[in-house]
Amino acid sequence: MASAPSSPSKRRAWLLAVRPPTLPAAVAPVLAGTGIAAVDGDFEVGRFLLALIGALLIQIVVNFANDLSDFRRGADTPDRLGPPRAVAQGWLSQREMTIGIVAITGAALIVGVVLTIIVGWPILLIGAASLVAAVAYTGGPLPYGYRGLGDVICFIFFGFVAVMGAGFVQIEELTWELAAASVPLGCTVTAILVVNNLRDIHTDRASDKRTLAVIIGERATRAEYTMLTLGAFVSVLVFATIGLLPWWTMLAWASLPLGVILVRQVAGGLTGGGLNPMLKRTAQLHLMVGALIGLGGVLATF
């Protein structure tokens, strides 16, 4: 059983609740979508920054809502192997976290309205759907994260929707090239969730949190992680070969050595707290893949 960490200051508690190591999950698809959109149109810094801020705010809402909902449902027990949660530790009250969720959601909506004025109503629908998906992961009457649907929804909203949305902000249209770029990002962002759920498989099972990892078991979850991580690189190669992605996006393969190391570690049998470093490094891999695909898109314009 893990010992309770000493109580941090209130400012520090909010920072821990934000979970900075998870923020690459929001940054990577914006980099990829913006870079690929640059192939078909001009790059506008203001639009990029708004898209990036909006994506970060949505990720923070995910983290806050997950913190509060898991506590209320009894998933954050003293046996939890991941980083301590703010509400479960008593660093922030349920009321404070609820206020935080409302405040960050409001800020995200403001960004969405500004982008809607600039690029049109579809971006508001994209942002609103993403916010609903963020809160409904562990919150609401039917939390999909407790019903084995987290991996699929993560791929759709934090891969496909996030990349397509970032591209739409720049060129005001949805293209097959953006859809292609969303596949490797969907793979790597879902791999982050998979390693998280693999780490928590025993505590989640005990608290009746039926993630996909709980449903399919450890061995199949390790295989899923392998397929997602290596599948990201295969998809870049396939889409570059058939012309949906510029050949410059093969720069993403520069991060393959890290992917291979991660697969060896995760598939090799690491368990429990030993997976925490793999979680952070998978997030780093996700960011690298997104940044290099985006860079490839920009270089293809020259």
Image (spheres, rainbow, N blue to C red):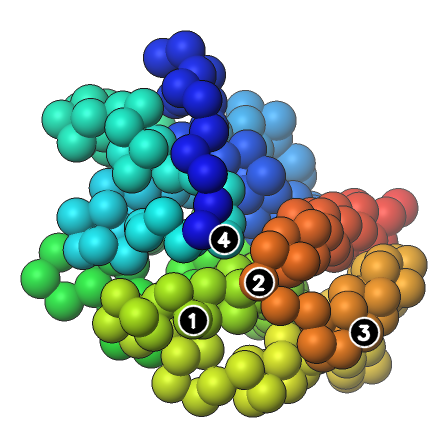
Please say if the residues under marks 4 and 2 sit with CB atoms less than 8 Å apart. yes
Q: Is residue 91 above or below residue 35?
A: above
Name the element at disc 4: loop
Q: Nearer the viewer, residue 282 or 219?
A: 219
- Label 1, residues with CA under 10 Å away: few <14, some 14-19, many ≥20: many
Q: Which residue is mark 1?
A: 202
Give the residue displayed 36% in from the left and 12% down from the top. 10
User: How far is the residue under mark 4 from the one under mark 3?
Assistant: 21 Å
User: How far is the residue under mark 1 from the one under mark 2?
Assistant: 9 Å
Q: Which residue is mark 4?
A: 81
Give the residue displayed 36% in from the left and 48% down from the top. 78
Numbered badge on residue 272: 2
Please say if the residues under marks 2 and 3 sit with CB atoms less than 8 Å apart. no
Q: Nearer the viewer, residue 184 or 8?
A: 8
Marks 1 and 4, the one that precedes in the sequence: 4
Name the element at disc 2: helix
Kind of residue at disc 4? Leu
Kind of residue at disc 3? Arg
